Image (tube, helix red, strand yellow):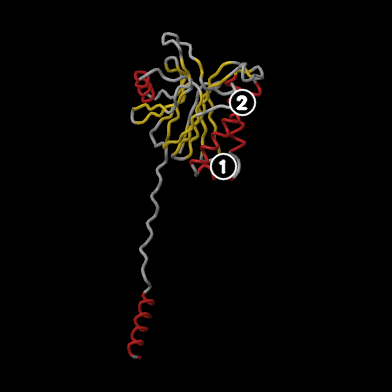
Amino acid sequence: MQLTVSGHRRRYLQLMLGSTASAYAVCNGFGTIDGQPVEEAALRELQSTLQRRSRGARFAYQIAKPKAMAAFLIAVVSHLNAYLFKRSAAHEDYVTSGASLTLILVCKDRAYLAHVGTTAAYVVRSGYVVALTKDDSCSFDDDQPARILTRALGVGSQMQMSVCSFRVASGDTLVLASKRLGGVEDRRALAKWIMRGEGTGTFGEHTVAAVPIHMAQVSPPMALPAHRTPLWYLMAALLLSLLLILSI
């Protein structure tokens, strides 16, 4: 399987984990960490954490087990939350920075997703766009564009996230967006945008990165020959039967 992605350096991350897995992430936020935008600090620490935790045989064992991969994602994002909260010098009643994150780990024909905040992920299949994440924000006024984050990274010592897994197929396109699409019309426009080959860039008010899935054809397992009893074994059994009959 070959995967490609590109996008804005400050908001997107692409990372190969060994020879069988790829990680893709989009981050958007407010505030700074050690003088850097929170997106850059979060993606830098995320890259370091993924590289460190994916070394060795344990990760290869986890890839084959969906529950183990879900636990892996939870551990990675929980560590990132603790790192951002500590480095921001914030506390439970005073928030200086926060970030939204959508992380997708692709392993062969299965993808694992962890999400928190207002970033978004979609899968485009056969011209249809399906949302993989929900919007962790709310607004008290429908006419007011400003929204309030209900869940985000780095705003507390503990956080909740959404984790799921799903299968991918050759021809699918995973889309990471810095902000959730508005509605049905935006999704239709995104599907046409992807079908035109516009892989990564600015889509309306959104910055998106497309991950096309190209899965190599897997050869069917070789058919084993039917089991046959050796001829000498049949002859020996027949001779033994004749001897038993003559001895009676």
**Horizontal side of residue 17 vs 164, given as left or right:** right
Cβ–Cβ under 8 Å for marks 1 and 2: no
Give the residue at x 51% y 20%: 150
Residue 32: mark in rendering: none
Which of labels 1 and 2 is toward the front?
A: 2
Which residue was labeled with disc 2?
Answer: 157
Residue 230 position by quadrant: bottom left
Residue 194 position by quadrant: top left
244, above or below 88, in the image: below
Q: Amino acid at mark 2?
A: Ser
**Horizontal side of residue 177 vs 228, given as left or right:** right
Disc 2: CA contacts within 10 A as few (<14), some (14-19) or many (>=20) = some
Across the whole image, how many numbered discs are drawn on residues? 2
Helix, strand or loop status at disc 2: loop
Residue 131 position by quadrant: top left
Which residue was labeled with disc 1?
Answer: 59
Q: Nearer the viewer, residue 126 or 78?
A: 78
Give the residue at x 39% y 36%: 170
Q: Quadrant of the C terminus?
A: bottom left
**Residue farthest toward the top in the current orientation of the protein:** 143
Q: Amino acid at mark 1?
A: Phe
Report x, y in % for residue 97: 60, 17
Disc 1: CA contacts within 10 A as few (<14), some (14-19) or many (>=20) = some
90, above or below 54, in the image: above
220, above or below 139, in the image: below
Q: Quadrant of the N terminus?
A: top left
Report x, y in % for residue 74: 55, 33
